Image (cartoon, rainbow, N blue to C red):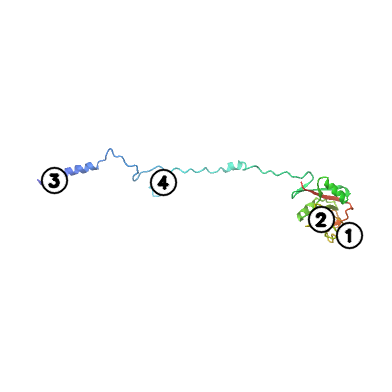
Amino acid sequence: MMRAIHVPCFLFIACLLLACTQPNPGFVPPSTPGEGAVLDGALPSESGGRADQISRPPLDLPAPPDLHAQDDAPADGPSRVDAPSPCGAGETHSGGHCYSVVSGGAPMMYPIARQQCQKSGALPASVNTAAEHALVYGLVGSSSQGAWIGLLRTGSGKGDFVWESGASVSYTQWAAGEPNNDGGAENCVLVWGPGVSNPQLPSRWNDAPCHVPRDTVVCERVP
């Protein structure tokens, strides 16, 4: 009797358990992925699992530069063009001034040399720095014995000089013992040229009488 009574109860309970464990045909899984699901863009971990289950958009990286194409591309901006010289033919441009030489004709007293420079709108050169002195002397021909420059005596003192341009004297290259105003009438100044016989004189300055002709004058103008 005891077994007859408990068997149906056991079968009822078993049937109830089986019914509860059957899948529900209408069941829809939630949108959140379960364990083991793989999403687009998920990153695998080093252990082989999924380290990141969050979808990531692909990175929008720029393409690497083409170095060969850059070599052929024109430089940015306009190409560099050297400005034309403001000086004319036969003139040397330096420091914003134009320098020229008059020589090869008849020797010139200083007033005539000055007139030769004025034909091109210039004056006998002023020399204010060592660099300018080197430029002026470099323009003097190798056979010249002396070239006029624009330094004039303004008084009886040995240092009383001024440039034709009106500038005060801040640089000199006097030869030894000069200026000496020999005879009291040396009111103009020349640069001894490479052709002078005394080897200690070339490139040095000398006060000299304005009426004694010289073969060269170095002219200077502002363009």
Q: Residue furthest left?
A: 1
The secondary element bearing badge 1 is classed as helix
Query: In front here: 181 or 176?
Result: 181
Which comes before the other along the chain, label 4 or label 1? 4
Residue 183, quarter of the rendered image: bottom right
- Check disc 4 and report the residue beneath it: 43
Residue 147, horizontal then vertical, whole percent: 84, 52
User: Residue, x 58% and y 41% (percent of image)?
Assistant: 69
Which comes before the other along the chain, label 1 or label 3? 3
- Check disc 2 and report the residue beneath it: 162
- Check disc 1 and report the residue beneath it: 182
Query: In front here: 81 or 219?
Result: 219
Mark 1 crowd level (few <14, some 14–19, many ≥20, 10 Å Cα): few
Q: Does the residue at mark 4 contact the one at mark 1 (Cβ under 8 Å)? A: no
Residue 4, horizontal then vertical, whole percent: 11, 44
Which comes before the other along the chain, label 2 or label 3? 3
Which comes before the other along the chain, label 2 or label 4? 4
Q: Does the residue at mark 2 contact the one at mark 1 (Cβ under 8 Å)? A: no
Instruction: Give how far apart the Cα atoms at labels 2 and 3 are.
Output: 142 Å
Q: Residue furthest top?
A: 26
- Quadrant location of the N terminus in the rendered image: top left
Query: Which of labels 1 and 3 is toward the front?
Result: 1
User: Residue, x 13% and y 45% (percent of image)?
Assistant: 6
196 is higher (above) or lower (below) than 73: below
